[in-house]
Structure formats: structure tokens, C-alpha cells
Amino acid sequence: MNRDFRGNDNRPRETRTNERVRAREVRVIDENGEMLGVMPPMRALDIARERDLDLVEVSPNVVPPVCKLMDYGRFKYDQNKKENEARKKQKIVTVKEIRLRPRTDDHDIEVKTRKIQQFLAEGDRVKVSVQFRGAEMRHPEIGRRLLDDIAEVLKGTVTIERTPSMEGRMMSMILSRAPGWEPPKKQTPPPSDKQKASDTPAEEMPQSSDAKDATP
């Protein structure tokens, strides 16, 4: 059982409706928000049924409890629909990792830098790590310089959430997308000469002047 430090049951209370409303008296609000007054729950339920609605306890902890007349099935449907739409709009931010070595060449660094930008454009955070092996552990400044160079190249594109720090044999920093930065839009390359030629309708070939009409 879920209880707080005072021993109170803090589980979510199930909404009581119709015959399950057990209070001696309830304060009733109609479907338009108008107050109908305080009455026994059976009287309130009769009114709800006359209007083809449900009696729903909306504030069970006040005295007397407050109940509202509504189409409870429709209310639950709309509520679930809103929750599903909100979940769809939520972006799950993941942390992608890019690994380097102290001796990673310039070409590979350029490739990995573009990959970092791609991850950031997709809304992810990026952990950039330099892995040291053997004697490389004696020169952590090489890894620090490498990470600083990447951060400088991406200046204006990233926010450094965590500056470079050692974690065992790894030196890492965490990057996120800088506020206001938008990834460059992909440009459609202009059509090639061959494509232009293929799109141009072929003209009718002129008849050769040397051609002679066949005599039947």
C-alpha cells in the first residue's frame, strides 16, 4: 500500500459515479456550471437520469462533496484523447555518444563534427568522449585540446552542458543545441545538363534533302 510518512493512503482515488456516490448529501452542479444546491445523492441521481447524464463526484474531500452532471463516458474519452496527443508531442531527448582517440586524424574529426550537428538538429544531446589507452594516459592535455577544438568549431551551434572531465580512461563533455540555432536547410542541387536535355522535348527531325519519293 502506498502511504506517506504520516501513514495516510496516497494512492489516487477512483472517481465515484452514480450509485457509487455514498455521501449523505452532495452539492450538485449541472452540466452548464449552474449550482443546483445541496441534496441527497439519490435525488441528484434522479436529476442526472432525467437529463440522460451521469452524477460524478468531482470534489470528494469537501463537506458536502461536490458532484457534477456530465456525460462521464464522453468526458473520459476526451481526457484520454488529450493525454495521448500530449504524449505524441513530447520529444524524448536521448544522449548520443561520439568517441574519439587522441590521435584521431583531421578528416575523421570533421566527419564526427558533422555527426554531432546532425544529432543536435534532431533534438538530442551529445556526449563527446576521448578514449585513452596505455601511455596515452600520460597526456590528458591532448584529449582536452581535442575537445576544446571541437567546441570551438561548433561555437554558436552548441551549449556546453558539462565541460571536459576525466572518467576513468575517458575524457568527456556533454553538448546540447544552442538556443536559437537552426540546422541549415538542405538545398536541392540544380539539375545537370543531361537532366535538362532529357526534360527538353525532342524536335522533329527534318527530312533529308537527298531523299526521293518512291515511285509506285
Image (spheres, helix red, strand yellow):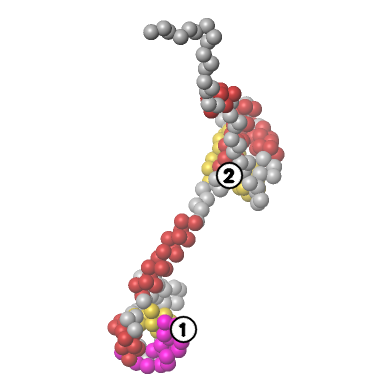
The tag earlier along the polypeptide, 1 or 2, is 1
Residue name at image x 46 percent, y 56 percent: 88
Please report the residue visible at 61 percent of the width from the left and 41 percent of the height from the top. Answer: 185
- The residue that disc 2 covers is 121
Task: Tell me the quadrant of the picture where the C terminus can be found.
Answer: top left
Q: Which residues are magenta?
A: 26-42
Residue 149 placement (x, y as % from top left): 69, 36
Q: Residues within 10 Å of mark 2 (few under 14, many from 20)?
A: some
Amino acid, disc 2:
Ala
Looking at the image, is 53 positioned above or below residue 177?
A: below
- Indicate which disc residue 18 carries: none
* Residue in the image at 41% along x and 88% along y: 28
Disc 2 element? helix
Judged from the image, the secondary structure of the residue bearing numbered disc 1 is: loop
Residue closest to the far front: 216
* Left or right: where 121 falls relative to 89: right
Task: Name the residue nearer the viewer: 79 or 147.
Answer: 79
Cα separation between marks 1 and 2: 47 Å
Q: Is residue 59 magenta?
A: no
**Is residue 144 in sight in this rendering?**
no
The residue that mark 1 highlights is: 33
> Going by the image, does 152 lie left or right of 37?
right
- At x 50%, y 56%, the residue is 90
- Direction from residue 56 to residue 128 in the image, left or right: right
Nearest-to-viewer mark from 1 and 2: 1
Relative to 85, residue 15 above or below: below
Residue 209 in percent (x, y) is at 54, 9
Q: Which corner quadrant of the image does residue 158 belong to?
A: top right
Q: Position of residue 58 (x, y in %)?
A: 42, 80
